[in-house]
Image (cartoon, rainbow, N blue to C red):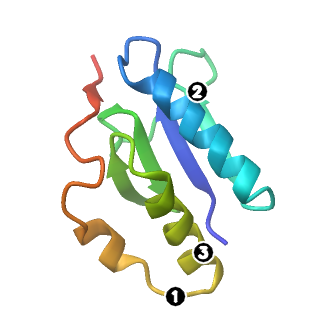
Amino acid sequence: MKPLHVYVSASCSVCARTHQVVAALRAQRPTYPVELVDLDQPDAVKPGFVFATPTYVLGERIVSLGNPALATLLNLLDTDAAGCDVQQMNNVEGEGLGHGEALP
């Protein structure tokens, strides 16, 4: 299983919802590795390809800019856990895209 990293920041107006989505995700898939990364923390590492918050990254691939529907995330994690290709998840129109906040 590839870890899901979710990048947030205090200046992000929709990141409060991100915390709720991650909590629900962890409750429904407690064994799946999910890390919430607060980019305002001094020890936080921001990959060069993360340019907005919230950003959901599975392995090394951005799977959502903004908060996707919980069902979409669950499907994505289940697909990954089964060892299937998740490329089609990047092509879903409207699933949280465009709802992120640009980083300074």
What distance separates the C-alpha of mark 1 from that of mark 3?
9 Å
Q: Which residue is mark 2?
A: 44
Q: Secondary structure at mark 3?
A: helix
x then y, percent, for residue 7: 48, 35
- The three-letter amino acid code for the residue at tag 2 is Ala
Which residue type carries mark 3? Asp
Real-space Cα separation, disc 3 to disc 2, in angstroms = 27 Å
In this view, 58 is above or below 26: below
Residue 10 in view (yes/no): yes
Judging from the image, what secondary structure is the residue with disc 2 in? loop
Mark 1 to mark 2 CA distance (whole Å): 30 Å
Indicate the quadrant containing the C terminus: top left, top right, bottom left or bottom right. Answer: top left
Q: Residue at x 63, y 59 (%)?
A: 3
Farthest residue, direction right: 31
Earlier in the chain: of badge 1 and badge 3, it is 3
Q: Is residue 82 above or below residue 60?
A: below
Question: Residue 12 appears at what percent x and percent y?
Answer: 37, 18
- Residue 78 in which image quadrant: bottom right
Q: Which residue is mark 3?
A: 78
Mark in the foreground, 1 or 3: 3
Residue 58 makes an appearance in the image: no
User: Within 10 angstroms of label 3, few (less than 14), some, or many (20 or more) residues?
Assistant: some
Q: How dense is the environment of label 1, judged by Cα within 10 Å: few (below 14), some, or many (20 and up)?
A: few
Amino acid type, mark 1: Cys
Instruction: State if disc 3 and disc 1 touch (CB < 8 Å).
Output: no
